[in-house]
Image (tube, rainbow, N blue to C red):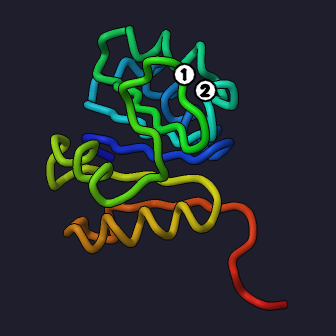
Amino acid sequence: MGGPLLLIGGGSGVVPLMAMIRHRARAGARVPTRLLYSSRSPEEVVYGEELEQRATARDGLEVIYTFTRSQPPGWKGYGRRIDRQMLEEVAGPLGADVQTYICGPTMLVENVANILVQSGLVPAQIRTERFGPTGGTA
């Protein structure tokens, strides 16, 4: 479907994104791909070891973490929830033709998708998958 790719996952929302990363590797694709992964702490990162191995393969995959509750000693990366500034820093270098996939808790997905659209990304370039409460009433 082209690229570059921006994958944004929250918590276990990284699972379907990991399937995409694995498929990308099996296909030998080298399209620039950036994963922004939000987790409460380094201990709660799903696929942490595999992500680090894949990120060092020098095939165009970059993994960026944000830890929202606790960071390791000396951490120089993000330490907050995903926000507009973070998305601009992470997505900006990928260009206007970026294909974006977001998966995670409903609030994270909706906030991130809204920020990206407000920043000028075409809604057709964004695919989402959510889990958890929707905020509606039963």
Residue at the spot of label 2? 42
In this rendering, the answer to whether 16 lies above or below 27 is below
Q: Quadrant of residue 62?
A: top left
Q: Position of residue 123 (x, y in %)?
A: 33, 71
Q: Are marks 1 and 2 in contact (CB under 8 Å)?
A: yes
Question: Which residue is located at x 31 percent, y 52 percent?
Answer: 87
Taking depth in this image into account, of 10 and 2 the one nearest to the observer is 10
Q: Earlier in the sequence, mark 1 or mark 2?
A: 2
Residue ranking furthest to the front: 73
Image quadrant in which you'd find residue 3: top left
- Pointer 1: what residue? 72
- As helix, strand or loop, the secondary structure at mark 1 comes to loop
Residue at position x 60%, y 20% from top? Answer: 48
Q: Which mark is residue 86?
A: none
Going by the image, does 90 lie left or right of 52? left
What amino acid is at disc 1? Pro
